[in-house]
Amino acid sequence: MPIYEFICNACATPFEELVRNGTKPVCPSCGTGDVRRVLSSFAVHSSSPNLGGQGASKNCSSCASSSCATCH
């Protein structure tokens, strides 16, 4: 039973949900079922081949964005 990250399409609230077989998550803020699963930042960092075991700081020197998901 994995925990997934979602964003509500109706109110843009991000949330995490423990998803069991066949369970459809609902937004905890507005109650709608119109949500989409997003890639978690943990999964991005752990599966990135460019990090080479050095952590996120390897890419930060060339990052121009202050809101980069890889660096921050």
Image (cartoon, grey):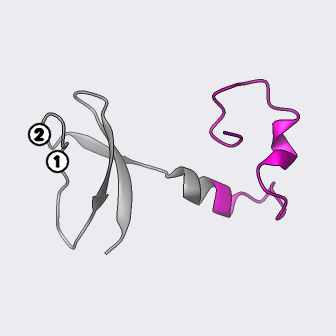
**Left or right for 25, reference 63:** left
Given residues 23 and 16, the one toward you in this image is: 16
Badge 1 marks a residue whose secondary structure is loop
Given residues 61 and 10, the one toward you in this image is: 61
Q: Tell me which corner region of the image, top left, top right, bottom left or bottom right, holds residue 62.
A: top right
Magenta residues span: 45-72
Residue 67 forms part of the magenta stretch: yes
User: Residue 18, percent across and down?
Assistant: 28, 64
Identify the image quadrant of the N terminus.
bottom left
The disc labelled 2 sits on which kind of residue? Answer: Gly
Q: Tally the marks.
A: 2
Badge 2 marks a residue whose secondary structure is loop
Residue 45 versus residue 30 in the image, above or below? below
Instruction: Check contact, mark 1 vs mark 2: CB within 8 A.
Output: yes
Residue 51 forms part of the magenta stretch: yes
The disc labelled 1 sits on which kind of residue? Answer: Val
Marks 1/2: CA–CA distance = 6 Å
Q: Residue at x 17, y 64 (%)?
A: 23
Q: Residue at x 14, y 34 (%)?
A: 30
Identify the image quadrant of the C terminus.
top right
User: Residue 66, percent across and down?
Assistant: 69, 25
In the picture of the structure, the residue carrying the numbered disc 1 is 26
Q: Main secondary structure of the magenta part?
A: loop
In the picture of the structure, the residue carrying the numbered disc 2 is 31
Q: Residue at x 15, y 44 (%)?
A: 33
User: Residue 15, percent across and down?
Assistant: 32, 46
Q: Tell me which corner region of the image, top left, top right, bottom left or bottom right, holds residue 68.
A: top right
**Left or right for 48, reference 60:** left
Label 1 or label 2, whichever comes before in sequence order: 1
Crowd rating for badge 1 (residues with CA inside 10 Å; few <14, some 14–19, many 20+)? some
